[in-house]
């Protein structure tokens, strides 16, 4: 059974940086991504990285967040810089053997989520 486990959530001041990690129980996912869900909001796409290293970002985080993968460690990262209070959300790791990147339905596997709170 595939498992994804996020870590690294916490409380950060606005303007600060933070890094999330996601460890997968197996390799070779075509695409791995990050989504987030703010209180009362929908789960939204944040960033994705394909097996070939191509990346995709939501406009709201482009230039501030960086997604990366270390397939030797079955781990994906989300480096978040210049954090804003509106980045406060539960962040979810997701993975798929498909090829889509932005839609929730593109992904078959999800982590349990990790809370990131950005204080102003």
Image (cartoon, rainbow, N blue to C red):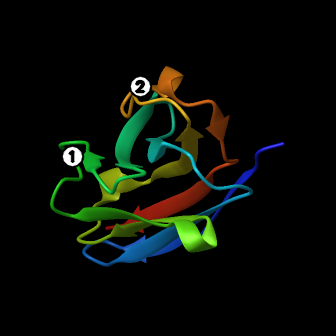
Per the image, label 2 sits on a secondary structure element best described as loop
Instruction: Please give left or right for residue 82 compared with residue 46 in the image.
Output: left
Residue furthest top as drawn:
105
Identify the image quadrant of residue 84: bottom left
* Residue 9 in sight in this render: no
Q: Give the crowd class for mark 2: few <14, some 14-19, many >=20 residues within 10 Å.
A: few
Identify the image quadrant of residue 85: bottom left
Q: Residue at x 25, y 46 (%)?
A: 57
* Residue 106 in sight in this render: yes
**Image quadrant in which the N terminus is located:** top right
Q: Which residue is mark 1?
A: 60
**Image quadrant in which the C terminus is located:** bottom left
Per the image, label 1 sits on a secondary structure element best described as loop
Instruction: Please give left or right for residue 108 compared with residue 2 in the image.
Output: left
Q: Which residue is mark 2?
A: 103
Q: Residue at x 34, y 68 (%)?
A: 80
Closest to the camera, between mark 2 and mark 1, is: 2
Q: Position of residue 44 (x, y in %)?
A: 40, 34
Q: Position of residue 61 (x, y in %)?
A: 24, 53
């Amino acid at each position: 059974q595939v498992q994804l486990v996020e870590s690294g959530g916490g409380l950060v001041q606005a303007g600060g940086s933070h890094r999330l990690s996601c460890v997968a129980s197996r390799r070779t996912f075509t695409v791995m991504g990050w989504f987030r869900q703010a209180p009362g909001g929908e789960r939204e796409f944040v960033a994705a990285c394909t097996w070939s290293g191509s990346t995709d970002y939501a406009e709201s985080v482009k230039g501030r967040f960086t997604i990366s993968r270390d397939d030797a460690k079955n781990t994906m990262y989300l480096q978040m810089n210049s954090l804003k209070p509106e980045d406060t959300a539960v962040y979810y790791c997701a993975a798929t053997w498909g090829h889509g990147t932005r839609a929730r339905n593109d992904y078959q596997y999800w982590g349990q989520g990790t809370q990131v709170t950005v204080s102003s």
